[in-house]
Image: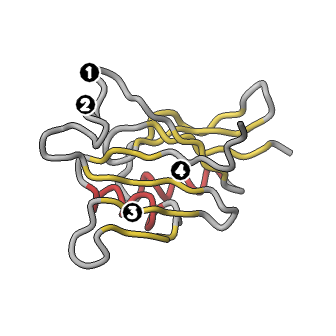
């Protein structure tokens, strides 16, 4: 059995606010929205390299179509890693836009420069680049 592709789907408390972060601040492009007219409850997004994510509004009863709660009881169930050529500039711009910096840019022993910011739901987003 071979699966052909996968992408993470994030559950958002405020889809419009999260869309502003992922589309406007990180540069994802909306490739699909449901419903097509009016306020969406789900959007699919993509970066130029083909990386994809989905954003969905938390259901009014807090349960997904699978019947289980959409939120963990504590902590964060999701972290995203995005690559950028200039981690320091990207994090400075995200901070200027009001997104909390969780970890300032620093060099890692495994050869990357990285930092963490929070998305509108508090999920950690790592901004990273290969060193040298």
Q: Do the residues under discs 3 and 1 have CB atoms within 8 angstroms? A: no
Residue pointed to by mark 4: 91
Image coordinates of residue 122 in percent, x first then y, are 34, 38
Q: Quadrant of residue 73?
A: top left
Residue pointed to by mark 2: 69
Instruction: Report the quarter where the N terminus lies.
Output: top right
Q: Residue furthest right?
A: 132
Decide which of 72, 114 is in the foreground and name it.
Answer: 72
Residue 16 against residue 31 in the figure, above or below: above
Q: CA distance from mark 3 to mark 4?
A: 25 Å
**Residue 73, label in figure:** 1
Q: CA distance from mark 3 to mark 2?
A: 20 Å
Question: Mark 2 falls on what kind of element?
Answer: loop
- At a point 33% along the width and 52% down the height, the residue shown is 56
Question: Mark 4 falls on what kind of element?
Answer: helix
Among the two numbered marks 3 and 2 on one chain, the one whose residue lies closer to the N terminus: 3
Among the two numbered marks 3 and 4 on one chain, the one whose residue lies closer to the N terminus: 3
Question: Mark 1 falls on what kind of element?
Answer: loop
Q: Quadrant of residue 126?
A: top right
- At a point 70% along the width and 39% down the height, the residue shown is 113
Judging from the image, the colouring scheme is: secondary structure
Q: Do the residues under discs 2 and 4 have CB atoms within 8 angstroms? A: no
**Residue 43, label in figure:** 3
């Amino acid at each position: 059995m071979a699966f052909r592709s996968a992408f993470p789907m994030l559950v958002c408390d405020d889809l419009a606010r999260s869309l502003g972060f992922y589309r406007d601040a990180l540069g994802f492009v909306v490739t699909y929205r449901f419903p097509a007219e009016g306020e969406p409850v789900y959007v699919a997004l993509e970066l130029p390299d083909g990386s994809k994510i989905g954003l969905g509004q938390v259901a009014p009863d807090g349960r997904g179509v699978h019947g289980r709660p959409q939120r963990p009881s504590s902590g964060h169930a999701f972290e995203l890693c995005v690559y950028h050529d200039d981690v320091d500039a990207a994090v400075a711009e995200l901070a200027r836009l009001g997104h909390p910096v969780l970890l300032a840019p620093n060099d890692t022993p495994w050869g990357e420069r990285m930092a963490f910011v929070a998305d509108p739901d508090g999920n950690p987003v790592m901004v990273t680049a290969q060193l040298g």
